[in-house]
Image (spheres, grey):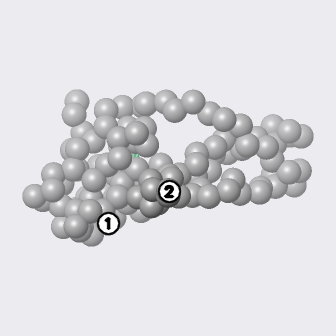
Amino acid sequence: MTDNKNDKAKRKRPIIQFIKCPSCGYGTSTVSYGEAPQKSCPNCKTAMEPIAVPKVNRGPIPKIDPQTCTGCSKCMHVCPMGAIEMDNQKAFIVEDRCVGCGRCVPVCSFTAITRPQ
Ligand code: SF4
Ligand code: SF4
């Protein structure tokens, strides 16, 4: 029997990969929501290879105050990890995906996002 809710969550889970050119060594990271994108190296045009990268926390996970959040979704668009989702027009952080980069904090015009020191 299929668990529709779980399947949906799996589809939404982003794949974060480091892509490295085997020829010239150029590297970049990419976030996708399905199959890993085929990429060729912007430097030398060789096909680039995805490399598994460990999740690294760079800082504390921010908090979003649902009372202050207006649901404008600006924070969702800047999160490189796809870690911010909306529920009932309120943003929330999926902590498993957040790497604590802090990009979402300054974009909130309503100061609804704070980061513990
Ligand atoms: S940017 Fe601020 S107000 Fe807008 S959705 Fe995110 S937390 Fe809510
Ligand atoms: S701290 Fe970074 S990874 Fe975490 S929710 Fe904000 S933008 Fe996304």
Q: Secondary structure at mark 2?
A: loop
Question: What is the residue that sits farthest to the left in this orientation?
Answer: 67
| Residue 43 appears in the picture as rendered | no
Q: Say which residue label 2 marks.
A: 1
Q: Residue at x 62, y 33 (%)?
A: 53
Q: Position of residue 77 (x, y in %)?
A: 41, 62
Question: Alpha-carbon neighbours of circle 1 within 10 Å: few (<14), some, or many (≥20)?
Answer: some
| Residue 31 appears in the picture as rendered | yes
| CB-based contact (under 8 Å), mark 1 and mark 2 | no
Q: Earlier in the sequence, mark 1 or mark 2?
A: 2
Asked if residue 8 is positioned above or below residue 89 in the image, the reply reads: above
Question: Alpha-carbon neighbours of circle 2 within 10 Å: few (<14), some, or many (≥20)?
Answer: few
| Total residue callouts | 2
Asked if residue 95 is positioned above or below residue 11 in the image, the reply reads: above
The quadrant in which residue 35 appears is bottom right
Q: Residue at x 69, y 53 (%)?
A: 36
Q: Secondary structure at mark 1?
A: loop
The amino acid beneath tag 1 is Ser
The amino acid beneath tag 2 is Met
- Residue mark closest to the camera, 1 vs 2: 2
Q: Position of residue 74 (x, y in %)?
A: 33, 64
Mark linked to residue 73: 1
The C terminus is located in which quarter? top left
Asked if residue 105 is positioned above or below residue 58 in the image, the reply reads: below
Q: Position of residue 64 (x, y in %)?
A: 21, 50
Find out if the beta carbon at label 1 lies less than 8 Å from the nearest ligand 1 atom. Answer: yes
Q: Is residue 86 left or right of residue 33?
A: left
Q: Disc 1 versus disc 2: distance between alpha carbons?
A: 35 Å
Q: Residue at x 77, y 57 (%)?
A: 38
